[in-house]
Amino acid sequence: MIKVNVKKKLKGYKGDFTLDVDFELEKGKFLSVFGKSGHGKTTLLRIIAGLEKPDEGYIEFNGKVYFDSNKKINLPPQKRNVGFVFQDFALFPNMTVYENLAFVNRNERNINEILKKLEIYELKDRYPSTLSGGQKQRVALGRALIRNPEILLLDEPLSALDESIRLKLQDEIKKLHNEYGLTSILVSHDKKEVFKLADRVFVLENGKIIKQGTPRDIFIEKDISGKFSFYGQVIDIRPAGIVNIATIDINDNLVEVVVGNDVKIGDSVLVGVKGFNPVVKVISLL
């Protein structure tokens, strides 16, 4: 069980705010922290990893206290059983693939096992500059796993990769999560990725958890038919007699739908069916 109750003052692009979260997560679960940029998601991961210090609070995993502001306990990252995979790979450029993993754990048998699992064993003598983005992220994932962590933290690790590579690595991350019995926390902006990987979702806004539940609870509207529902963004609105017609971008596909006066250009919306008529609802998440 992970227990996290922390506060930290942060500076956002709209002004100062306080990251203030309090949650528990069962061992073996896969949590996604979802929300817009600049609301404290990455800072939360860095606090759990020990890379940043909260102003106050408490962090515990399986009975081991990582941080307690009252008792002045603050374990450094190397003493926390955590693996961290960053968006920008964060590999050592002057080390080979093998050496990047050996820097964390010199057990040759474990290194070779993980390299084979991630299908990069044949790349072990190459340097990061010679690798593709997908290969680099496999190395970064291997370096996190070689620590034999109990907690795996993933900070948008696949966001810079092509769609086909993302899908394959999503499958591998889920497989490794189950195989190693990890407790994983993923920061992602990709609803499809969250839906595929996570057991539970926290929506973070201005440093606060404003919504939580399963991916289905968070992303599927209960009053709109699941047979037809797509997220999109309003890029134009034009009057047509007594109604307004909105042009909506849905994954680079443009559709026109009748909308109400509450819908504005730039709104994130959910286009779905209620009965037999398309319905457009303005939403707060994207």
Image (cartoon, helix red, strand yellow):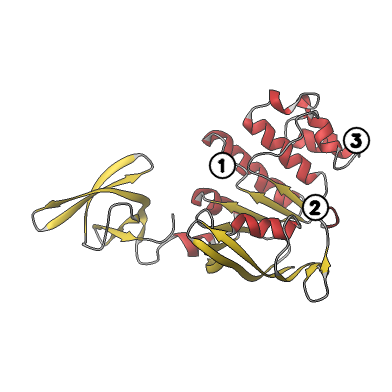
Q: In this figure, which residue is indicated by the disc labeled 3?
A: 108
Q: CA distance from mark 3 to mark 2?
A: 17 Å
Amino acid marked by disc 2: Pro
Q: Earlier in the sequence, mark 1 or mark 2?
A: 2
Q: In this figure, which residue is indicated by the disc labeled 1?
A: 159
Quadrant containing the N terminus is: bottom right
* SS assignment at label 2: loop
Q: CA distance from mark 1 to mark 3?
A: 31 Å
Which dot, 1 or 3, sits closer to the camera? 1
Q: In this figure, which residue is indicated by the disc labeled 2?
A: 149
* Image quadrant where residue 68 sits: bottom right
Q: What residue do we see at 83% from left, 69% from top?
A: 73
Which dot, 1 or 2, sits closer to the camera? 1
* SS assignment at label 3: helix
Mark 3 and mark 2 in contact? Answer it, CB < 8 Å: no
- In the image as oriented, which residue stretches furthest toward the bottom? 70
Q: In x, y percent, where is residue 133?
A: 63, 31
* Image quadrant where residue 198 sits: bottom right
* SS assignment at label 1: loop
Q: Residues within 10 Å of mark 3 (few under 14, many from 20)?
A: few
Q: In x, y percent, where is residue 106?
A: 91, 39
- In the image as oriented, which residue stretches furthest toward the left? 241
Nearer to us in this view, 173 or 23: 23
Taking 250 as reference, is 145 left or right? right
Nearer to us in this view, 104 or 171: 104
Amino acid marked by disc 3: Glu
Q: In x, y percent, where is residue 215?
A: 52, 60
Q: Earlier in the sequence, mark 3 or mark 2?
A: 3
Q: What residue do we see at 65% from left, 60% from top?
A: 44
Q: In x, y percent, where is residue 136?
A: 68, 33
Mark 1 and mark 3 in contact? Answer it, CB < 8 Å: no
Amino acid marked by disc 1: Ser
